[in-house]
């Protein structure tokens, strides 16, 4: 078993998940990343993590597939022996007005953003209960708090993650496991690269779009420094929705 703390980040190969991985590697963690399809991005991220001294590996499994998650996490536990922290970060969007939203796009977003957190946390929480400690961060969105036209599926999933976070914080607090959520605003990643965001800065008090590193710092705070914080949703959005 490694002496260092370990963290599993779902969707850790790109974007916000990758930034969280690098931030936690800098904080001394052995970082385990998960991804589903983009092998090159995952390998590249693992190489960058290794240069930071992290004993990192990428595990390919689809977080929507409970059997694949079970197999993947068993392999992670065999390899690392423990998990001190978990970031439920994997997510997708399938935007469209609700009246035109088919069930395929509804289900894909609910499965990837919300049911995935059930699939992964189901295994990881059991391990954390045995270990008698752990920290979990769920990647929600300001859209889960305030809604957004064209994102009924995504808003429902991200709001669901907030309820999940608060309920789990109450259930697991006595086991020394903290559960919090981060609610990012507009962050520049592959997920937002095709959105027309011209002029959005004017509506953001801090007058800029967010970077993945802005979210990573909040995640690191909640995992590593926020020892008396649980059940909270930390908005990291440049003041967009205060
Ligand atoms: P991104 O750049 O598109 O990266 C998504 C990551 O999730 C990739 O690593 C991808 O793996 C992985 N992934 C997707 N489906 C998966 C599945 N079924 N199983 C395992 N991994 C899967 O997205 P991002 O912008 O960094 O977003 C990360 C999280 O932040 C998401 O939950 C998103 O909803 C949330 N968020 C983002 C923003 C924003 O403005 N960007 C705002 C609020 C919240 P592959 O590389 O293999 O595809």
Image (cartoon, rainbow, N blue to C red):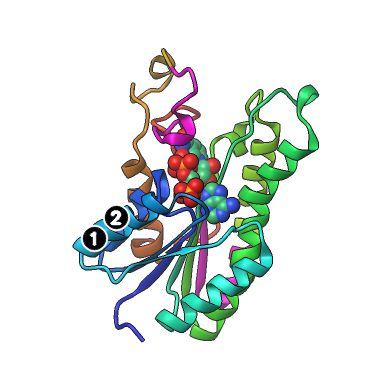
Counting the numbered discs, the total is: 2
Residue 68, visible in the rendered structure: yes
Camera-nearest residue between 95 and 67: 67
Q: Position of residue 231 (x, y in %)?
A: 55, 58
Camera-nearest residue between 174 and 75: 75
Q: Quadrant of the N terminus?
A: bottom left
Q: Are marks 1 and 2 in contact (CB under 8 Å)?
A: yes
Camera-nearest residue between 34 and 117: 34
Name the residue located 33 percent from the left edge and 21 percent from the top edge. 207
Name the residue located 38 percent from the left edge and 31 percent from the top edge. 238
Magenta-drawn segment? 168-197
Pointer 1 residue: 26
Pointer 2 residue: 23
**CA distance separating discs 1 and 2:** 5 Å
Q: Is residue 55 magenta?
A: no
Name the residue located 50 percent from the left edge and 77 percent from the top edge. 75
Q: Position of residue 184 (x, y in %)?
A: 47, 39
Quick check: 52 left or right of 179?
Answer: left
- Does the numbered disc 2 mark a residue whose Cβ is under 8 Å from ligand 1? no
Q: Is residue 173 magenta?
A: yes
Tag 1's secondary structure? Answer: helix
Q: Is residue 158 above or below residue 150?
A: below
**Which residue is most to the front?**
40
Tag 2's secondary structure? Answer: helix
């Amino acid at each position: 078993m490694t002496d260092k703390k370990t963290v599993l980040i779902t969707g850790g190969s790109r974007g916000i998940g990758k930034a969280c991985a690098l931030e936690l590697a800098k904080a001394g963690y052995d970082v385990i990343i998960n991804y589903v399809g983009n092998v090159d991005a995952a390998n590249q991220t693992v190489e960058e993590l290794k240069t930071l001294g992290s004993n990192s590996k990428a595990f390919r499994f689809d977080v929507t597939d409970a059997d694949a998650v079970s197999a993947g996490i068993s392999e992670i536990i065999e390899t690392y022996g423990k998990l001190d922290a978990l970031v439920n970060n994997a997510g997708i969007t399938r935007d469209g007005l609700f009246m035109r939203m088919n069930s395929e796009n509804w289900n894909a977003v609910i499965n990837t953003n919300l049911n995935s957190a059930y699939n992964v946390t189901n295994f990881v929480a059991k391990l954390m209960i045995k270990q008698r400690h752990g920290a979990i961060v769920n990647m929600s969105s300001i859209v889960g708090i305030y809604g957004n036209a064209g994102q009924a599926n995504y808003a429902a999933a991200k709001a669901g993650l907030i309820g999940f976070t608060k309920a789990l914080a109450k259930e697991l607090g006595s086991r020394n496991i903290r559960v919090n959520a981060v609610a990012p605003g507009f962050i520049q990643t592959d997920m937002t690269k095709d959105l027309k965001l011209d002029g959005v800065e004017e509506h953001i008090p801090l007058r800029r779009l967010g970077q993945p590193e802005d979210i990573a710092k909040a995640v690191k705070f909640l995992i590593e420094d926020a020892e008396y914080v649980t059940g909270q949703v930390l908005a990291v959005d440049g003041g967009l929705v205060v």
